Image (tube, helix red, strand yellow):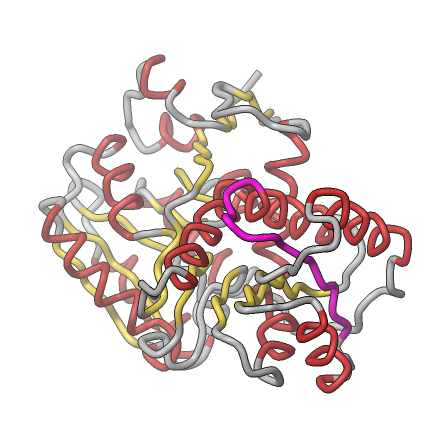
Amino acid sequence: MEFAQHVRLDGPSRMSWALRIGGAFALALACLAPARAADPPAKHEVVLLAQSDSRRHAGGPEPVAVLYPDLGEPWRRVFSEILEGIEDQSRQAVHGYPVAPNADAGELSSSLKRNGTKLVIALGRQGIRAAAGVDYPTLVSAVSTVTDADKQAGILLAPDPALLFSHLKSLVPGARRVFVIYNPTQFEWLIRMAREAARANGLELVALEARDLASAARQYESVFASADPRRDAIWLPPDTSTVDEATTVPIALREAWNRNLPVFSSNLLHVKRGVLFALIPDNVKLGRSLAGLANATLGGEPKRGVQPLREVHTALNMRTAGHIGLSIGPKLARSFDIVYSEP
């Protein structure tokens, strides 16, 4: 049986490391999963958020509004961590608004106006839908992709390919080629970045299109049949139309183990199940970076286009590394935040 070893703590935290990592994983699941009915509104927490804002900025306007889904734990904790990071870094007063799926756009707009809102940060699908009904400059986050990525602004949950490829080369110096299967209607923006990042890391990116799970499964079978374990690696992107826990992920895990191929992703559960490594969100740092974008926008220097996630925690499976023939020294292992290994 594998166990998780916490090998490095990165920066101060108001919450335990286990909760921070668990929250990051829950956020990924919440944002990638199909929409579901919200839990009953958490009246107590809404009051606490409002009191926190009023104590910090009593009587003044609150130019930055953060809209996020009104969900139960563990998702509520994750959005609270992002809000914490936004408050830490924002130059303006911040107010959090938990929104239900059936939130009244007119009532929300009136509330934002009363509070002197100048900019909205929309988190998750519900937050983004709510923001579409109000007329403010908007930053988006806590989702892996959006439509019209070039026309929106914000930070998405898809990790920066440059970080992924840098970690791949540190673990697998002989890697020369990376295969990725993706839906071009959703992730073309990410693959454009990945092509440049691959070249910068001395890698060839083989990006194969698939618009549904059936075609993705066929692509994975073809890739694994031809991949060379001495030079190839497989990237599982945060694309639910090509990466599915019940179909394509089991194929990738089975074939990677049988053929000694390194596979990496952005899902902590994948690492626990046998993927070599993954990059997952650091929620508080993500909030701080969103606040930086908000500061720039309110200062007259808006950033165009969405950005990939650079605020990450790292996870490594040492058992998988040993199985595929990698030699991971103690120093390199300690550079990862979570390490799964055998007792």
Residue positioned 24% across, 31% down in the render: 170
Q: Position of residue 135 (x, y in %)?
A: 55, 83
Q: Is residue 175 left or right of residue 61?
A: left
Q: Does the magenta-highlighted stretch encompass residue 96?
A: yes
Residue positioned 35% across, 60% down in the render: 307
Q: Position of residue 192 (x, y in %)?
A: 21, 67
Q: Is residue 261 left or right of residue 241?
A: left
* On screen, residue 81 above or below 152: above
Q: Quadrant of the N terminus?
A: top right
Q: Position of residue 96 (x, y in %)?
A: 69, 58
Please identify the quarter of the rendering in which residue 32 is found: bottom right
Please identify the quarter of the rendering in which residue 306 is found: bottom left
**Viewer-closest of 183 and 187:** 187
**Viewer-closest of 96 and 301:** 301
* On screen, residue 211 above or below 226: below
Judged from this view, the residue extending furthest toward the front is 59
Q: Position of residue 9 (x, y in %)?
A: 51, 22
Judged from this view, the residue extending furthest toward the top is 330
Q: Is residue 17 left or right of residue 39?
A: left
Q: What segment is highlighted magenta in the picture?
A: 88-100
Q: Quadrant of the C terminus?
A: top right
Q: Does the magenta-highlighted stretch encompass residue 144?
A: no
**Viewer-closest of 87 and 25:** 87
Residue positioned 61% across, 79% down in the render: 129
